[in-house]
Image (cartoon, grey):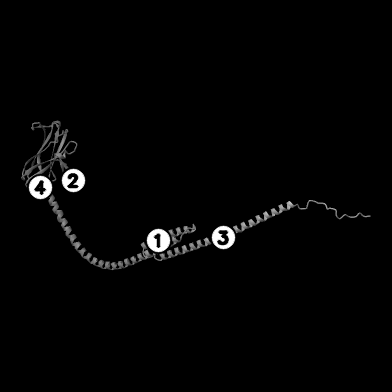
Amino acid sequence: MSTPTNFNQSSPNYGFTPDGNNQKRLTTYMGIAIAVLLGLCVFLLVSKYNTSNKLDLTTSELALQKEAFTELDAKYNEAVSQLEQQKGISAELDAKINQQLSDLESQKNQISGLIREKREYKSAMASFERQKNEYLAQIEELRKQVGQLTESNTQLTGQNEQLSSSLSETQGKLSEESTAKAALASEKSAVESERNQLSKKVDIASAIRVKNITTKGVDVRSNGKERTKSKAKKVDKLNICFTTEANEVSPAGEEVFYLRIVDPTGAPLAIESLGSGVSQNKRASEEFRYTTTATCNYSNGETNVCGAWQPGQNFVKGKYAVQIYNKGYLVGTSTFNLK
């Protein structure tokens, strides 16, 4: 006989029945997770939006930058083309244009730098345009000036041809006159040369020669009396005397004779403060230094003349030379010794 089943008997609990606190914690965790996910989604959406805006802005800036470079290149190429068309008139004008092109290129590079650095370039672009227009105006003014100069040059060329023709005629006449003058000048030169030779001969002939040249050394005493001495240490003064020869060519009147005393070393004795100086040796065509002078009233005959030299210093021993000049010519020489 079977045992009756008890349906009210409790089933065994294996630990799967949810606890009330655990259920609440699970719900909280799920809420936090959902909130984090929602925040992350919002962050990603905002980031995407900002990135999209930045990309749009960068694309716009690049487009504007490209447009600016295109505008700059167009203005620069236009300026270069306009200026290049003005070349070929003159080297000076071409040099001016080349300088202007160089300046515009520098300006273009500066504006390019502003565009790349995203700085304000509009005013610089406007300045570039104004500069180009000023350069073109300058070139146009120079072209006008060149045109005026060309016209003036044409007129001057015509006048120059007329003058050249007149000059050729004048030169022909002058050549004839020059030939005649050359002949006259040659004749005059020959006459002048002959006259100079004759004048020189007369000048030489008028020089008064001298003879009997004597030189005495004297000792000047305190009372003024002089005694002849031959020892150098005793001599205070030199007296040079000579006689003029007769000369009918030289005019009568006062004559000056230049006395040159040369010491044993070959040096002329000279002290400017005592009357020494420089005169001209006409025969040698050179100057000579003289010691002193002697003058006389010449009457075309023999005349005794004396000169003196008292330097106020001692004389040296040895052989001395005396040279006498008149009218620039050597007219007498002698020597003497001091012991």
> Label 3, label 1: how many angstroms apart (C-alpha)?
44 Å
Image coordinates of residue 108 in percent, x first then y, are: 45, 60
- Mark seen at residue 224: none
Most extreme residue toward the right is: 1
> Label 4, label 1: how many angstroms apart (C-alpha)?
83 Å
Image coordinates of residue 165 in percent, x first then y, are: 25, 67
> Label 2, label 4: how many angstroms apart (C-alpha)?
20 Å
The first of marks 2 and 4 along the sequence is 4
Is the C-beta separation of discs 4 and 1 under 8 Å?
Answer: no
Is the C-beta separation of discs 2 and 3 under 8 Å?
Answer: no
Q: Name the residue under label 3.
A: 53
Q: Name the residue under label 4.
A: 206
- The quadrant the C terminus occupies is top left
- Mark seen at residue 286: 2
Label 3 crowd (10 A; few <14 / some 14-19 / many >=20): few
Secondary structure state at the residue bearing disc 4: helix
Q: What kind of residue is marked 3?
A: Asn
Is the C-beta separation of discs 3 and 1 under 8 Å?
Answer: no
138 and 268: which one is in front?
138
Q: For residue 190, what is the image quadrant? A: bottom left
Q: Nearer the viewer, mark 4 or mark 1?
A: 1
The first of marks 4 and 3 along the sequence is 3
Q: Name the residue under label 1.
A: 100
